[in-house]
Image (cartoon, rainbow, N blue to C red):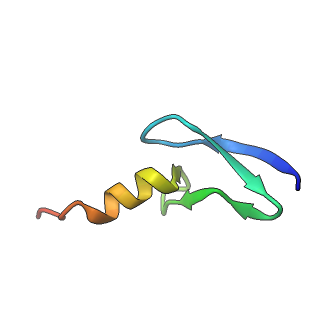
Amino acid sequence: MEKEFVGKCKACNSNIYCNSGFIEGVVQEDKTLLCFECSNKNEKEPKTN
């Protein structure tokens, strides 16, 4: 299994890798990356308008 560095999480600055063709995180609309942990935190927080 080959891992390739693709960038850093916008929220926590942890390294994000591509592992056998799968990114270990989420690409946002603004093309930034979030790790799965930070992405899950954002989904659970209620949105305020």
Q: Horizontal placement of 44 versus 14: left or right?
A: left
Out of 4 and 29, give the one closest to the viewer.
Answer: 4
The quadrant of the rendering that contains the N terminus is bottom right
- Across and down, in percent, residue 26 comes to 55, 60
* Residue at figure coordinates x 27%, y 64% from the top left: 44
Q: Horizontal placement of 11 versus 6: left or right?
A: left
**Number of marks in the rendered image:** 0
* Residue at figure coordinates x 48%, y 63% from the top left: 29
The quadrant of the rendering that contains the C terminus is bottom left
- Across and down, in percent, residue 25 comes to 58, 57
**Rendering quarter of residue 5:** top right
* Residue at figure coordinates x 18%, y 64% from the top left: 47
Residue furthest to the right in view is 1
Q: Horizontal placement of 41 versus 8: left or right?
A: left
Residue furthest to the top in view is 13
* Residue at figure coordinates x 48%, y 42% from the top left: 10
- Across and down, in percent, residue 7 comes to 65, 42
Residue furthest to the left in view is 49
